Image (tube, rainbow, N blue to C red):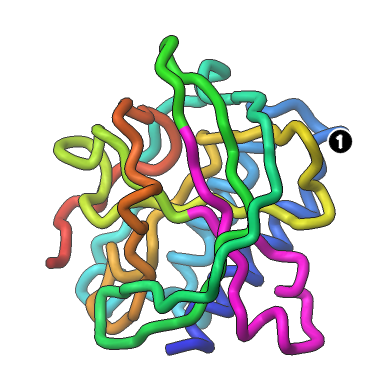
Amino acid sequence: MDSVIRTVLMFAIMTNSLIGFGQVDYVTKTQLKRDSIDAEFSDTATTILDENALNSFTGLHYFPFNDKYLIEATFKKKLGKPFKMSTSTNRLPIYRRYGVLTFEVDGVKCKLNLYQGIKSMQNDSALNDYLFCPFKDQSNTDSTYGGGRYLDFKLSDVSKTVLIDFNQCYNPYCAYSNRYSCPIPPKENILSVRIDAGVKKPNQEIH
C-alpha cells in the first residue's frame, strides 16, 4: 500500500506546484484544484473509486471557499523520534515529527504537528521535500469524514511562519474505498474546533 500513499502525495505535490499562490487568486486556485481532483476521480484510468461508486459519481462535495480558514501559523522545528503511525489497516508506516504549527481559530489556540516519512527521507525522491499533516476536528462528527483529513506542506516552504489553507484539505483514499490503507491522525493532531473548510464527507462513509 506504500505505492498508493505515494501516488496520493505525489498528486498533491504536483498540483500545488502547478498552481502557485502568486499566479492566481486563492479562490481560483482552490476551484482549479477541485476540478482537477474531480477529473481524476471521474477518469477510469486514474480513479480510485469502485465500479458502483464511479457510475454514480458527480463530483466531490466541498465547503465554499472561506478566507477565514486561510491562517498564518507560527512554525517551530521540533524533531521527534521515529514512530509507527496507525492506519486503517495493519500497515504501520514510520514517521517522525518534524515540527509544530501554532495558530488560532475563532480565538482558540491550536497546534498541529507536521510529520516526515522516514522511508521518503531515505530515498532520493520528490517526497524528500514533503511534510504530512493528518488531522481531525469537531466537524468529523457530522459534515466531514470521521477518519480525519489531510493537508500537505513542502519542507522547502516552511519557515518561521507558514500559511495554512484549510480550503485545500482532502480526504484519505480509504474514505472512498476500503481497498486502501490510510494513516490515522495521531491524537495530538485532533483539534478542539470545527474546520468547516475543504472537502466534506462522501455520501456514505466506509468503516
Residue under pointer 1: 23
Most foreground residue, 57 or 64: 64
Q: Residue at x 38, y 69 (%)?
A: 183
Image quadrant for the N terminus?
A: bottom left
Whether residue 67 sits left or right of residue 92 in the image: it is right
Question: Looking at the image, can residue 60 be seen?
Answer: no
From the top left corner, tell me how far across and down residue 129 is, in percent: 77, 66
The vertical placement of 11 against 35, above or below, is below
Q: Residue at x 60, y 24 (%)?
A: 71
User: Mark 1 falls on what kind of element?
Assistant: loop
Most foreground residue, 87 or 38: 87
From the top left corner, tell me how far across and down residue 193 is, in percent: 32, 26
The residue carrying pointer 1 sits among few (fewer than 14), some (14 to 19) or many (20 or more) residues within 10 Å by Cα, namely few
Question: Looking at the image, can residue 139 be seen?
Answer: yes
The vertical placement of 203 against 82, above or below, is above
Magenta region: which residues? 111-133
Given the image, on which type of amino acid does mark 1 rest? Gln
Q: Residue at x 49, y 42 (%)?
A: 112
Residue 93 figure quarter = bottom left
Whether residue 109 sits left or right of residue 74 in the image: it is left
Whether residue 38 sits left or right of residue 127 in the image: it is left
Image quadrant for the C terminus?
A: bottom left
